[in-house]
Image (cartoon, rainbow, N blue to C red):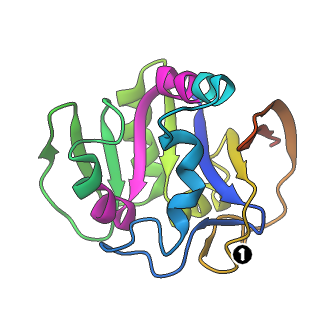
């Protein structure tokens, strides 16, 4: 069975996006700094290996509606070449893209996860979006969390780990490069 993994780049002060997320600033003001390690023309070998491992493991993706709305113009496709499920309150027909299809799910996280697991096969279900990540964490549906800890203080924006109940984690991975520290945790249930 696939596992559910929450992958997020995060500032030292816990923000996964800067303030004022929208079409003009898809990662919020200053938030693109969180992905410098991934988008650089000359990535560190360790960072490339982490990114490659994530890409190789993805079987399906779940995104929130805001992530979809600000991401599609940038990606011009699904975020990974796998089925992508948009957790939303606004129904919409499937959107076929060059690499895969966006399916819009309106009946909650459990239903969305069931569809994503079926589509993922043996691959991981990867969660994208701060609110989506929090909703899955609050529901106890996340198996692993990977935080790419970026040495920057954003001071404001969207936090991933707020307004949640007590969650115990076991560190199962640590890779440090010059620009980011990749931390992988298993969620203890």
Quarter holding the C terminus is top right
Residue at image position (49%, 58%) is: 129
Q: Is residue 55 above or below residue 8?
A: above
On whether residue 65 falls in the magenta region, the answer is yes
Q: Is residue 75 left or right of residue 27?
A: left
Q: Is residue 160 above or below residue 137?
A: below
Q: Is residue 66 left or right of residue 30?
A: left
Residue at image position (64%, 22%) is: 45
Relative depth, front residue between 166 and 172: 172
Q: Is residue 85 visible?
A: yes
- Residue 109 position, x and y percent, is 47, 56
- Residue 94 position, x and y percent, is 15, 48
On whether residue 39 falls in the magenta region, the answer is no
Residue at image position (60%, 50%) is: 8
Q: How many marks?
A: 1
Relative depth, front residue between 114 and 135: 135
Q: Main secondary structure of the magenta part?
A: helix
Relative depth, front residue between 175 and 65: 175
Residue labelled with disc 1: 163
- Residue 110 position, x and y percent, is 48, 51
Quarter holding the N terminus is top right
Q: Which residues are magenta?
A: 51-71
């Amino acid at each position: 069975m696939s596992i559910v993994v929450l992958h997020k780049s995060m500032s030292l002060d816990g923000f996964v996006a800067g303030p004022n997320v929208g079409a003009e600033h898809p990662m919020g003001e200053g938030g693109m700094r969180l992905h410098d390690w991934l988008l650089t023309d000359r990535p560190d070998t360790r960072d490339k290996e982490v990114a490659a491992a994530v890409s190789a493991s993805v079987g399906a993706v779940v995104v929130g509606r805001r992530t979809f709305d600000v991401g599609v113009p940038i990606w011009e496709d699904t975020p990974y070449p796998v089925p992508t499920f948009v957790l939303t309150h606004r129904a919409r027909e499937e959107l076929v893209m060059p690499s895969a299809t966006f399916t819009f799910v309106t009946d909650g996280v459990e239903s969305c996860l069931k569809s994503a697991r079926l589509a993922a096969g043996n691959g991981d279900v990867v969660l994208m979006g701060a609110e989506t990540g929090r909703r899955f964490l609050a529901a106890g549906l996340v198996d692993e969390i990977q935080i790419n800890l970026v040495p920057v203080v954003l001071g404001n924006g969207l936090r991933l780990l707020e307004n949640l109940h007590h969650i115990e984690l076991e560190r199962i991975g640590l890779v440090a490069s010059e620009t980011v520290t990749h931390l992988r945790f298993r969620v203890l249930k």
